Amino acid sequence: MLKIAGVQFIGQADKEANIRTAIRLVRRAAAQGAKMVCLAELFSTMYFCVETREEYFDWAEPIPGPTIDRMSAVARETGIVLIAPIFERTLDGRFFNTAAVIGPDGKVIGKYRKSSIPFMDVGRSSEPRGNEKFYFEPGDLGFPTFDTPFGRIGILICYDRHFPEAARVLGLGGAEIVFVPTATTSMTRYLWDLELRAHALANIYYVCGVNKVGVDAGGSSRNHFGNSMVINPRGEILIEASDSEEDIAIAEVDLSVILELRALWAYYRDRRPDQYGPLLKPVAPPAVRKGA
């Protein structure tokens, strides 16, 4: 059996404070037996995308870079695989919302860049939302899966989880566990476990959803609902973290059941890619009825 964990905590405007908190909780998860640990989206900063301020670009870093180097040291110290999502700046001056995958030897195995970048105006919601398109380019690495000493994993970052095509591509890539680091609030609370459970069930892999929690200190009034969770390939929630406090969602997973369930249900065997052409065609968004 393998233990995996999602670590959630309240963000700070102080980057150093976030990194110290992350290190403390990652060590705690490892002390509880976790061999894979995932941090929330943009773990080293508060969720800054509700404002369009040029100075926030100063928080972006290369991978490897100062923050990932520190997290690499923790992964090596504890012997874990660590998923560390940060604001990435490339050497040629581009910016991405990126998760680094660090192995137990402290080396970066690879990275995933958030594919779908949202722009959310206020609309009918009273909570601050965000213009991520101001900060991040759409990811250009596709939907890779990563071989680690403890299993093959994939990553979806926050808004990506709303796209079933992305979740299926990870399954086709052999993912046994999909980590979903997010920074999401009450507007999408009703979708949280529903979507994650559906991805686990439809693609027959484990899912670990990791959310920020609470209101960022020094940031906007967005209230992240936490509820980080681990879900098995039958769509069952194994563990769920607090909705208001820092916490660790940690659970044992049995990767051997994945092949058994895939053989039972044959979702991958009986796919019809020859019929899925419309998925590749751009379409106009559906019209919104007046008064809707």
Image (cartoon, helix red, strand yellow):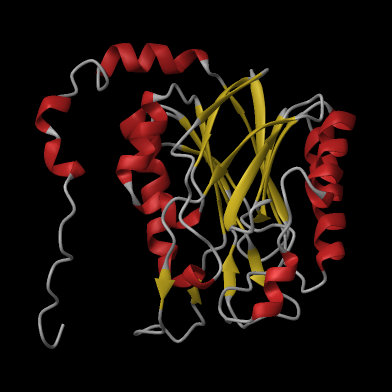
1 vs 113, nearest the viewer = 113
Residue 115 placement (x, y as % from top left): 44, 50
Q: Is residue 176 left or right of residue 264?
A: right
- The image quadrant of residue 109 is top right
Instruction: Classify 64 as above or below 284.
Output: above
177 vs 83, nearest the viewer = 83
Residue 199 placement (x, y as % from top left): 37, 39
Q: How many marks?
A: 0
Residue sitting at x 34%, y 34%: 168
Residue sitting at x 90%, y 31%: 77
Q: Is residue 46 left or right of residue 114?
A: right
Q: Is residue 217 left or right of residue 259?
A: right
Residue 254 placement (x, y as % from top left): 55, 19
Instruction: Classify 15 as above or below 41.
Output: below
Residue sitting at x 86%, y 64%: 17
Instruction: Classify 141 as above or below 268.
Output: below
> Quarter of the image containing the C terminus?
bottom left
Residue sitting at x 36%, y 25%: 172
Residue 165 visible in rendering: yes
Instruction: Classify 269 as above or below 54.
Output: above
Residue 231 visible in rendering: no
239 vs 118, nearest the viewer = 118
> Quarter of the image containing the N terminus?
top right
